[in-house]
Amino acid sequence: MSRLFHLAASCCLATVPLLADTILYQQPPTYMGTSGGFQSGYTSDLAAGFTGFRVFDNFTVASTGAVIQAQWDMFAWYYEDPTVNPVAPAVDTWDISFYANNGGIPGAKIYDAVEPASSVTATLLGTALINGNARVNVYQFDATLPSPFNATGGTEYWFSPLALQNTNSIVEVWIDGTGGNNASYQEGLDASGMEVSGVVHTNDRAFTLLAAPEPGGFLLIGTGLLGVGCWRRRSLGDRLRRRPRPDAIAADRAC
């Protein structure tokens, strides 16, 4: 069974400037605002030799454009011993992928970039409180893609950053954003990285896709589209080799 933790955003968060000239699509993180609100997160990582989870969020751009840079916001959480937190991310490699849509859930993978963690910038944004007794670090990750992902206007896609690491004690949690369709998707993975379950979650994820400016300039604004779909083949919790690792973290308040 999955475990649920409570997250309350702290008040010491900083903004990070975008590094490219054109925002192709954006779902800004909710904790960056001043109005407060509940925060949530879902784990998107796979440790060598263990089961894991992968999270996706869907998007649609209004006009065709080439994605050259991706940003997403996550926090690192040492769940086996909360007193150890805050900790740094334990990511060795990032698997940054785009998927076609298949009836309201991720379909075929159509773009994949596997990048060492050293080539992805991690900027500390601030901290967040888990269950009222453990503080974790919140980061924005920024990756320049090795080749552009060409997104066709009006076509729905799915974006997914997966942290590949050697430890199962630290999870990487993709926090919630706003501006999409208020839904995202999470797969359960076996130790080989194959999908064994899938479920639709509420709340968008926080990410930004950027493109190089073209002559004349343009700004493409997309909206998330998601069909109603949810399926699960079997419980991943029964497959865990160690203390059950969390797949979801939710908030009950914001400061």
Image (cartoon, helix red, strand yellow):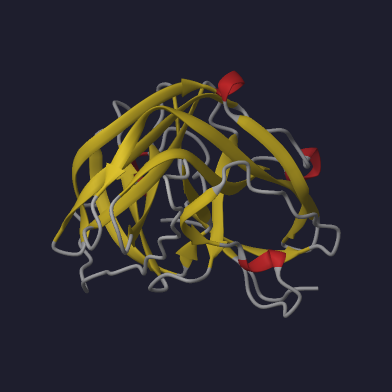
Spot the residue most to the front. Answer: 216
Q: In the figure, 75 relative to 229: above or below?
A: above
Q: Nearer the viewer, residue 181 or 149?
A: 149
Quarter of the picture containing the C terminus is bottom right
In this rendering, the count of numbered labels is: 0
Q: Nearer the viewer, residue 65 or 70?
A: 65
Q: In the figure, 127 relative to 53: above or below?
A: below
Who's the residue at 48% across and 71% down the image?
A: 179
Q: Is residue 18 left or right of residue 13?
A: left
Who's the residue at 59% across and 49% down the image?
A: 73
Who's the residue at 28% across and 69% down the image?
A: 225
Spot the residue most to the left. Answer: 103
Q: Is residue 99 left or right of residue 85?
A: left
Visible in this render: residue 162?
yes
Quarter of the picture containing the N terminus is bottom left
Q: Is residue 175 left or right of residue 32?
A: left
Who's the residue at 71% across and 71% down the image?
A: 33
Q: Nearer the viewer, residue 7 or 80?
A: 7
Coordinates of residue 97 in the picture (x, y in percent) = 34, 37
Visible in this render: residue 78?
no
Coordinates of residue 250 in the picture (x, y in percent) = 58, 66
Q: In the figure, 137 relative to 114: above or below?
A: below
Coordinates of residue 240 in the picture (x, y in percent) = 40, 38
